Image (cartoon, grey):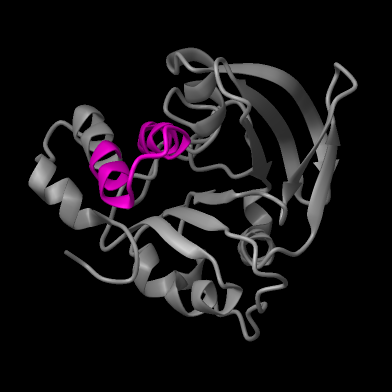
Amino acid sequence: MPVPEKIGNGKDLKNNLYWGCGYGVKMFFKNKSLNWNIVKSSLNPSTNVLERVVYKHKTKNVYLVADAYDGEFIKQTTIDFFDASAGNKPIEIKLDNHKTIIAGGASNLICYVGHDGLMDFQISNYPNAQNKNKRETIILACYSKSYFSEGIKKTGASPLIWSTGLMSPEAYTLEGAINGWIEGKSNEEIRTLAAQAYCKYQKTCALKSAKRLLVTGWYIS
């Protein structure tokens, strides 16, 4: 669906729909989530990444590393997501308290939030799994189950949450799913939490419809 030019600008960190708007990843986890604190923020930390924000969970030893990619390079963004899902390219991040964490392909949970670029282009070679470490993915983008399945199978990662139709990939759904994941809930329980969050903010969407939209694993139930 078309959106206003300002929030659709993939180079505008302040106003972009998926980052700087109230329900974008950066601003939602900063201002509306009760469970996270920002421990580091940096501009242009790597190629094609305009900003990186690292959050620390308030009660659990869990870090959330959020990268805002330049929208002009959505294909490379998607490739990077598959690389991380396969266990490639771990990223070492030194925090301001001198602690070092390893993200990227070393992460336990890898998430993609935004436009489904695979509707517009193809990736010729998906990466194979680099090890047997358990990695799970959340893919909040329109029809992500249809478009991302081939690549996710090759990476060896497990799809925790993805979509079966058009959706608004905003951060409240991500937060709901991550909260359940941290608490060690089952995949179906996490799916329900994600769907409940989606309904809360997408007020015209009933829970039954949200659970048809947001599914877990390889089969629809």
**Prevailing SS of the magenta stretch:** helix
User: On the picture, is 20 further left or further right than 61?
Assistant: left
Identify the residue at image location x=83%, y=51%: 47
Q: Which residues are magenta?
A: 171-193
Most distant residue in the bottom direction:
124
Identify the residue at image location x=63%, y=37%: 66
The reply to whether the magenta stretch includes residue 68 is no
Q: How many marks?
A: 0
Residue 3, by quadrant, is top left
Residue 102 pos. (x, y %): 78, 43
Identify the residue at image location x=49%, y=43%: 8
Residue 213 pos. (x, y %): 22, 55
Residue 189 pos. (x, y %): 26, 43
Along the line of sight, which residue is nearer the eye, 193 or 7? Answer: 193
Along the line of sight, which residue is nearer the eye, 209 or 91? Answer: 91
Identify the residue at image location x=43%, y=74%: 149
The reply to whether the magenta stretch includes residue 176 is yes
* Depicted 136 relative to depicted 143: above or below: above
Q: Quadrant of the C terminus?
A: bottom left
